[in-house]
Image: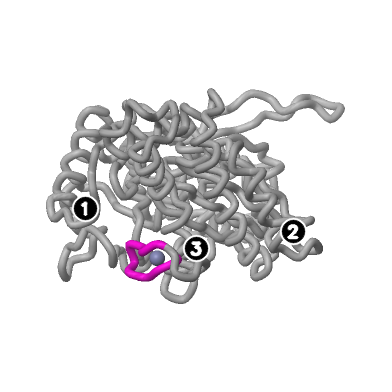
Amino acid sequence: MFGKQVVLLMEDWYKQIKSSKIRSDILKQLYFRKSLLHTDLSLIYDRSIPVINKIINQLIKEGLVAEFGYAASSGGRRPQQYAVKADAMYTVAVAMDQFSTRIVMMDMHNNPVTKIETLELRLNDNPAALNLLVTAINNCIGQSGIPKEKILGMGIGMPGFVSVSEGVNYSYLDTGIQKLTDYIYTATSVPVYIANDSSLVALAEQKFGAAQSKHQAMVINLGWGIGLGMIVNGEIFRGNDGFAGEFSHIPLFEDGALCLCGKQGCLEAEASMLVVTKKAIEGIKQGKLTSLQSFVNEPLQVIANAIFEAIAIGDQYVVDLLSDAGYKIGKALAILIHIMNPKVIVLSGLGTRAGKIMLAPIQQALNKYCIPRLADKTELLISTLGFDAGLLGATALVMENLNDDILNKHFKQQPMDKMPTK
Ligand SMILES: [Zn+2]
């Protein structure tokens, strides 16, 4: 009688493991935290060590997880760490901006397994953009040689009003009545997740960068525009319709320059990298002495790169342009700090390369416009991920969406080993 009860309990236990989402959750934990002990996982999931061991062994048997060296000893034997196997699965990461798109295949240790392809792709008024994008993604997948069943999904960060839940970008890449995500899935046979570019930069900073383990963080995506990704109570905050964080278009300057959105005086129209680059061109034409002179007829991306290079030699004109932009961004950050009271503000994205020059004028604007009680406790940091943040965020988006159903489609769960009798 007693034996039968034990068998029933064990059957329940197997069913519980099978039906729970713990298998994909453990993989996610191992991916985002690089490596963990089974005691860590036991605490995270409030499961006993034998249960966690069982699942880990199962994942090892399935070729998804591997032993990953030993942690430091706290007295006894050094405990074994586990990690997702780098070649267990792959993701396609796509980071788009107004003018160019980067595409790369990543392994589970966030190492690129293909060359990062940079495609010149203007989004505004360009009906050919979508087909060019899909062709470039298919080329990346084809060149990688990775079979599609090992590709968990594709994350795409893109500018514009992006609805994560509807799979639509209301600003660019119009697909009529079809969802943008469905369109790209049909063309590539890889599941597609989209999000606003700045929210993915924030996700990358939260998972791998300067905002790691920060519950209240504002991540500024300094690019052609000035994006904002908000981490509120430990989660990416998207607002009611998914459009929160339009920092670029807060109206800061009376009678300011005309913005792409059609209004005047937006932050973006006064301080984005696009504006800094255009001002640089104007200045050169008016005879300003600067090392940028020979670049005046080059494309905007080339001039922007030359601006970043000119920082190293202390080009006074470039320092003035970036300082002016930094001060204006600082004024806008004062508003953000007053409303959100963040623990940390991270300057991330393409413009991180100018972060060092911009920090002082941003701080000066905060000194002037921000209430010290709030500003003093807010750290201002420059991203260490920099321009890679967009690609890392796109990969993280795929991994965030991983669940047991998706995992089982790619890796059919093997039968569980028998429960140890002791
Ligand atoms: Zn605007």
Q: Indicate whether residue 219 is drawn in magenta.
A: no
Magenta stretch?
257-265
Residue at image location 30% in from the left, 63% down from the top: 167
Decide which of tag 2 and tag 1 comes sooner along the chain.
1
- In the figure, 237 relative to 143: above or below? below
Q: How many numbered tags mark residues here?
A: 3
Q: CA distance from mark 3 to mark 1?
A: 29 Å
| Element class at badge 2 | helix
Where is residue 241 shown, x and y percent of the image? 41, 74
| Location of mark 1 (residue) | 184
Report the residue marked by disc 2. Answer: 375
Q: Residue furthest bottom?
A: 240
- 299 horizontally vs 385: left or right: left
Give, as a three-letter code, the residue at label 3. Answer: Phe
- Ligand 1 placement by image quarter: bottom left
Q: Amino acid at mark 2?
A: Ala
Q: Residue 17 in the image: state x and y as whole percent.
A: 53, 54
Residue 258 in percent (x, y) is at: 36, 64
User: Could you tell me which residue is drawn at 67 percent across and 29 percent down?
Assistant: 80
Callout 2 crowding tier (Cα within 10 Å): few <14, some 14–19, many ≥20? many
* Dot 3: element: helix
Task: Give the labeled residue for mark 3.
Answer: 247
Left or right of residue 112, residue 99 in this image: left
How crowded pointer 1 is (Cα within 10 Å; few <14, some 14-19, many 20+) is rated as: many
Q: In this rendered view, identify the residue nearer to me: 7 or 375.
A: 375
Residue closest to the eye, 225 or 215: 225
Quadrant in the rendering for residue 62:
top left
